[in-house]
Image: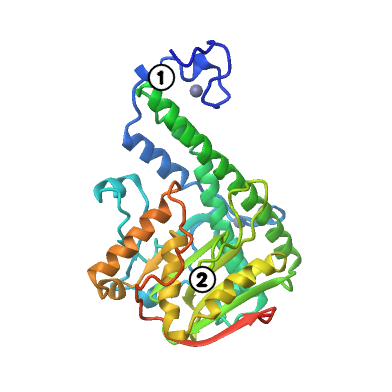
Amino acid sequence: MGLGQGRNAPCWCGSGKKFKLCHLNRDSQTAIMPWEAAKVLRTSFSEEVCSAPNEWRDLCSKQIIRAHTVPRSSSLNRIALNGHVYTFIPSFENLTKNNGRLVPELVGVRRASTFTGFCSTHDGGIFSPLETTPFVGTTEQLFLLGYRALSRELYTKESTASMTEVRRDTDKGRGIREQVAIQAFNSTFERGVSAGLRDARAEKAEYDVLLCSRQFEEIRGYVIETTEAPPVMCSGGCFPSIDFDGKRLQDLSNLKLRPAMISFSSFWGGAAGAIVLQWRAKDQTLCERFAASLHRIPDEGVGSALGRLMFNCFENVHIAPLWWEGLDARTQAALVRKMTDTANPFVEQKDDALRDDGILLRGFTVANRYTVGFSFS
Ligand SMILES: [Zn+2]
Ligand SMILES: [Zn+2]
């Protein structure tokens, strides 16, 4: 069995192990139970590390905390109901319970949006220009939004990469045809994961240098201020591949290139709601095109556009319960569908994912918009 393979030759699946230690007799091995996979997933996503620059690690406190990713700790309180917000938790149990759909769940604001990715000293110290003074769009504040989003992206990518072994074992007890299909799937997925990890690590190392030398001049951004706290709050980084007009911006399938990166944050800035796109000067051309396509959308369409962006590109999304419960069932179902696809690495983003799809989202009243470090050309 096994594609006419020698026992001591490297296994056909690409694991790098010998066939006899890998896929020989895999069809008769005990299948991995969903709860076993879920446990590994949970463990890898609760790894405790401090993401501060290496040079500063000797100052780390002993305590790794649940660091909030949505900036300004009071932000989520502003949209919470009885101390809770809706959040998407892509766990195995949740997906099974809801027939593969990722539906939002109420989570206490103290846990929502957190990751165990900073020690108490560095979480408080690094981000204090963002946390303790109102947001006014300084390059330092923009940098810190990007730094936090990037730290979380890197943390998530490291966790995903650490799951390689588990993913490779998911064909235990299956027939040879299924084994081949599953491992082909895995190989494609792993290539994407390792390229993403390589890019996020490189980006993070460069952000560390900027932070240590306090060089924030190369930070660029586009800020939308809203009169109230945004009903959907989010912090994330992405490689934008399409804009709000449905135009292609960059081809992510060439894994050799490091794509342009943008961070997105929506939160309460202290005096106004703040929705911030942030990037570095090296990615100006592409990120400006992305921001310009959002800038062209009239004020009354901005909420719907931001909704498309957040539900199509980020999982780290937190929702005001009153806002969510005020949506009609059709709109809720559409947003759940978007989020379910976003969380599934095998569903490719459609070219028109950010274009107007007729789903109207209210609750984002635009008060002001401005650019940081550039003007639209
Ligand atoms: Zn194998
Ligand atoms: Zn630390």
- Judged from the image, the secondary structure of the residue bearing numbered disc 1 is helix
Residue located 46% across and 19% down the image: 23
Residue located 38% across and 78% down the image: 78
Residue located 37% across and 19% down the image: 27
**Residue 38: where, in percent of width, then height?**
36, 40
Which residue corresponds to mark 1? Answer: 26
Which residue corresponds to mark 2? Answer: 245
**Residue 341: where, in percent of width, then height?**
39, 54
| Quadrant of the image occupied by residue 204 | bottom right
Please say whether residue 113 is visible from this viewpoint. no
Please say whether residue 13 is visible from this viewpoint. yes
**Residue 282: where, in percent of width, then height?**
72, 65
| Quadrant of the image occupied by residue 238 | bottom right
Marker disc for residue 277: none
Query: Which residue is nearer to you in this view: 286 or 83?
Result: 286
Name the side, left or right, on which 335 lies relative to 227.
left
> Is the distance from the Cβ of mark 1 to the nearest ligand 1 atom less than 8 Å?
yes
Q: Is disc 1 surrounded by few (<14), some (14 to 19) or many (20+) residues within 10 Å?
A: many
For marks 1 and 2, give the one nearer the viewer: 2
- Judged from the image, the secondary structure of the residue bearing numbered disc 2 is loop
